[in-house]
Amino acid sequence: MKICAVIAEFNPFHNGHKRLIDEIRKKGFTHIVAIMSGNFVQRGEPSIISKSAKVHSALLNGIDLVVEIPVVWALSSAEKYASAGIQIAKSLGCIDAAAFGSECGDIDALKKISSVLKSEEFELLLKKNLDLGISFPKAREMAVLDLISDKNTANCLHFSNNILGVEYIKAAENLNFKADIFTIKRNKTLNYRSASEIRKMIMDNSNEFKKYVPPSSFEIVSRETINETAPCVLDNAEQSMIYKLRISSKEDILNLPDVNEGLENRILNASRNCNSLSELLFSIKTKRYTMSRIKRILMCNFLGIDRSIQNNFVPYIRLLGTNSKGLEIMKLVKKFASLPIVSKYSHVTKLSKIAQKVFECECLSSDLYSLFSKKINTCGKEQSFKIITNFEDKNFT
């Protein structure tokens, strides 16, 4: 048995994800674990389809076991998101390698950048650039370029998957994760589109996205759309999010992850003077604060996630779905895992207070998730969640 982990969002599962899995298989890996964000994603938005739908898609397209990145860290910076994913991979105790897709496909270049980002010189240069009013992405790239004098390598930071890849590498080094880490270059041919492009097609009610996702993924998204549980988008809950901001105190905002340097005042002022969520976001955004960062902050406020809980390590392994090969992985996980395994709600009640708090955040986020769709569901879905199984191809009922 040779096991590879991928950290992913599958938002939604598309041809690029399928290609990544196929390439991993070609390298001799017999089993693949997906460490996946659930109903909310790293860019600070609801997942366009539900966690359950994403698990089904993954199991039908080459993933053997799906475990969850808790919402507390799914809604965090690239650094904390990657660290949470690597923590979980390491805690499984049986992972031989971790793989990710990237725009550059050059693991050596990404390792070089990772090394630079960990240096004191980088921190000083970054602060200097930020103090000049330069946007964070540009300030970071300039600092890296000053230290390595290689424009092509520094340019890797233009692309989101490269950035996440660098953070995976950093996290693996910081956490002493010994498994091999490698990357697969993303494909740009006619049959591939980015997840953001596919989400736009879905939101536009266009079936054009059918060309860019596996058949089972198309069927699952279509089913969710017909049932009005998808697409889940920010604007559907804008009144609720603005309401939560308007009843929040300055102290509440200061306690949110990634809020500092007076940002709390911009957020509170905007919440009281803007009439829509889009207006509010653009009022808060500056060169220093990216749109994704602002969205994450507002979503954490909406879901009750503060920095005190996000600054902890991931406290458990949450199982979401498996096939027959996944059960083979689970035999090893039960033997070697360094964290408690959660497969049902009753398991959480026996864990630490921190673990229970993390799961409480998961339950609340699940209760609020349907507010972002056209159809509002009842609460309690997380407490009654059962592991999704797929032991027969094409069976996702």
Image (spheres, grey):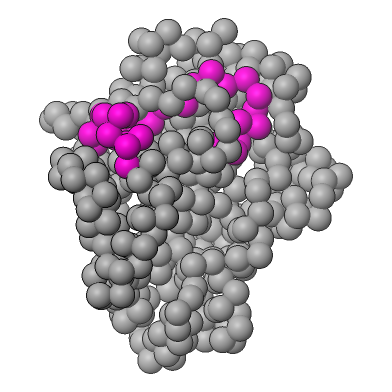
Is residue 109 visible in the rendered structure shown here? yes
Q: Residue at x 26, y 29 (%)?
A: 106
Question: What is the quadrant of residue 362 in the picture?
Answer: bottom right
Residue 269 in magenta stretch = no
Q: Quadrant of the N terminus?
A: top right
Q: Horizontal placement of 109 versus 356: left or right?
A: left
Q: Residue at x 55, y 79 (%)?
A: 253
Residue projecting furthest to the front: 121
> Residue 132: where, in percent of width, then height?
25, 75
Q: Which one is nearer the viewer's eye here, 189 or 116?
A: 116
Compared to 392, does 178 lie above or below?
Answer: below
Compared to 169, does 248 lie above or below?
Answer: below
Is residue 50 visible in the rendered structure shown here? no
Compared to 28, does 170 lie above or below?
Answer: below
Residue 97 in magenta stretch = yes
> Residue 149: where, in percent of width, then height?
18, 45
Question: What is the quadrant of residue 62 in the picture?
Answer: top left
The magenta stretch is: 86-113
> Residue 305: where, in percent of width, then height?
60, 65
Q: Residue at x 71, y 16 (%)?
A: 331
Q: Which one is nearer the viewer's eye here, 84 or 189?
A: 84
